[in-house]
Image: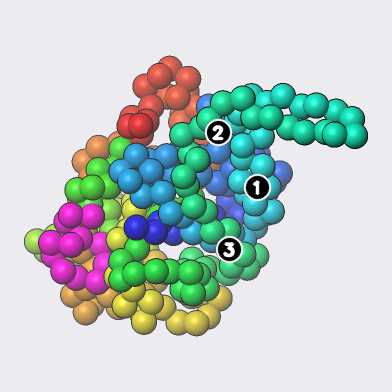
Amino acid sequence: MQVVILCGGKGTRLREETEYRPKPMVPIGGRPVLWHIMKLYAHFGHDRFILCLGYKGEAIKHYFLNYRATVCDCRVTLGQQARVEFLDAFPEENWTITLADTGQETMTGGRVKRIEKYLEGDTFMLTYGDGVGNIRLDALLEFHRRHGKLATLTGVSPPGRFGELSMRDHRVVEFNEKPQSAGGLINGGFFVFQREVLRYIDDDPGQVLEQAPLRRLAADGELMCFPHQGFWQPMDTFREFELLNTLWARGSAPWRVW
């Protein structure tokens, strides 16, 4: 199954790092947070990725176009018959990655709409390029297939306030982006969508997925919530960047399930 990852935001609250690179390329333990997210999906058998690029997207292209040289030991022979020999394999050899430029200023919904032409099949997964967790993606997908609605998001306990959900029997009855009140689960991303969800997204670069599209899906009874009680953490600030790197360095990163 294809996995769409939103990689185009500017990450202004993490300016210490994102002034020089896109937020998905900010490292945890020497590897981009994007790599950690992709490793989680690949662990559950999902290794066909569509990356929605925007701000400094060339850095993500460069990383994957030169991936083997970056991660493998190699032997270089110089001279007129120059060659490069890679000395070891790497577990990501079978990943398929579509690198799609979706615009510098495009919002989340607009980015999803622009990669529609690359989608295959009736169902796809989608997440943000800056958050990690020990999400049971197999259970998430099973939940989505069982309820038969168009869309599933993962509800998590908030370290901050993002998109609070009002629910009834796992069905999202109301979606409020970044409310001021406390309490309840929030939108943690890790979506599963039927292709029909794209009908809810306007062909407008300013369309925000978390506003009208998710609200309309909720109003139509087509948005369900998969509750996740485990670890989830976005990397929005320098403090969160330090937290995730500390967990990785200690060998206690909950999202490292591979």
Nearer to us of marks 1 and 2 is 1
Q: Does 72 sit above or below residue 141?
A: above
Q: Please name the residue shown 19% across and 48% down the image.
A: 139
Image: magenta residue range? 141-152
Task: Describe residue 73's horizontal placement relative to residue 28 as left or right.
Answer: right
**Residue 184 appears in view:** no
Amino acid type indicated by mark 2: Arg
Q: Which residue is mark 1?
A: 65
Q: Which residue is mark 2?
A: 31
Q: Which mark is residue 100?
A: 3
Q: Which x, y percent locates residue 249?
A: 48, 20
Mark 1–mark 2 distance (CA, rounded to whole Å): 15 Å
Amino acid type indicated by mark 3: Ala
Rendered-image quadrant of the C terminus: top left
Task: Describe residue 96's horizontal placement relative to residue 182 as left or right.
Answer: right
**Residue 168's quadrant in the figure?**
bottom left
Q: Please name the residue shown 27% across and 53% down the image.
A: 154
Amino acid type indicated by mark 1: Leu
**Residue 16 appears in view:** yes
Query: Residue pushed farthest right?
Result: 80
What is the secondary structure assignment of the residue under circle 3? strand
